Image (tube, rainbow, N blue to C red):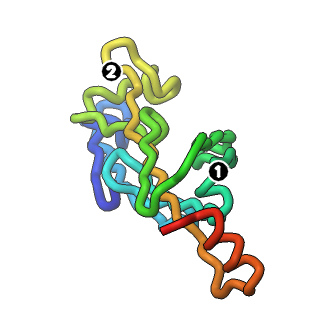
Amino acid sequence: LDGHVITFPGMASQLPAAVNGNLHLKIIQRPHDTFIRDNDDIHTTVSVTLRDALIGFEKHITHLGGYDIKLQHPGVLKPGTVARLPGEGMSKRRDSAENYTSSSAENDINQDYPLERGDLLVEYKILFPDSLDSTTRNFITEFFPS
């Protein structure tokens, strides 16, 4: 998280016949154009046309990790819908620097401290037309009775 400091005891100023100092690593988080971090979860908004919201859709987004994620909704999508994709968020923070051994730092996975991730939350924004012509209005009136 932004501003979090991880301390690695005895990992700085390694000189012969001297006491090693501590290495302090401060996390500085930059804003992203598409994703917002909330602890271990990440949030994004995906726009969906009114047509796709009514009949279903399949879309693809690029994850922060650079890989493709398929989003699909088979039927009617209601305004305000948020989809949760478990395990597609940020790496969960480890409790202490003791968990960051040189081997786990290189591999980022350690049997004692497996890599766990938060979730990706996708909020769907339905795009409504600004206006309707008379043909479209009549069609909607005929096929969507009140």
Which residue is nearer to you in this view: 47 or 14? 47
* Residue 130 percent location from the top left of the image: 64, 86
Asked whether the viewer can see residue 78, the reply is yes
| Residue 27 locus on image (x, y percent) | 38, 55
The percent coordinates of residue 10 (x first, y second) are 28, 35
Q: Are marks 2 and 1 in contact (CB under 8 Å)?
A: no
**Image position of 98 (left or right of 51):** left
Kind of residue at badge 2: Tyr
**Disc 2 or disc 1, which is closer to the eye?**
1
Cα–Cα gap, marks 2 and 1: 44 Å
The residue to which callout 2 is attached is: 113
Which quadrant would the N terminus be assigned to in this image? bottom left
Q: Tell me if residue 19 comes above or below residue 43 in the rendering.
A: above
**Which residue carries the number 1 mark?**
55
Relative horizontal placement of residue 6, taking residue 70 as reference (left or right): left
Q: Toward which corner of the image does residue 139 lie, by quadrant?
A: bottom right
SS for dot 2: loop
Q: Which residue is rendered at x = 60% and y = 71% of the image?
A: 127
Is 11 situated above or below 102? below
Q: Is residue 40 left or right of residue 63?
A: left
In which image quadrant can residue 142 be found? bottom right
> Of residues 92 and 107, which is closer to you in this image?
92
Q: Residue at x 68, y 45 (%)?
A: 58
Which amino acid, mark 1?
A: Ile
Q: Residues within 10 Å of mark 1 (few under 14, many from 20)?
A: few
Q: Helix, strand or loop at disc 1? A: helix
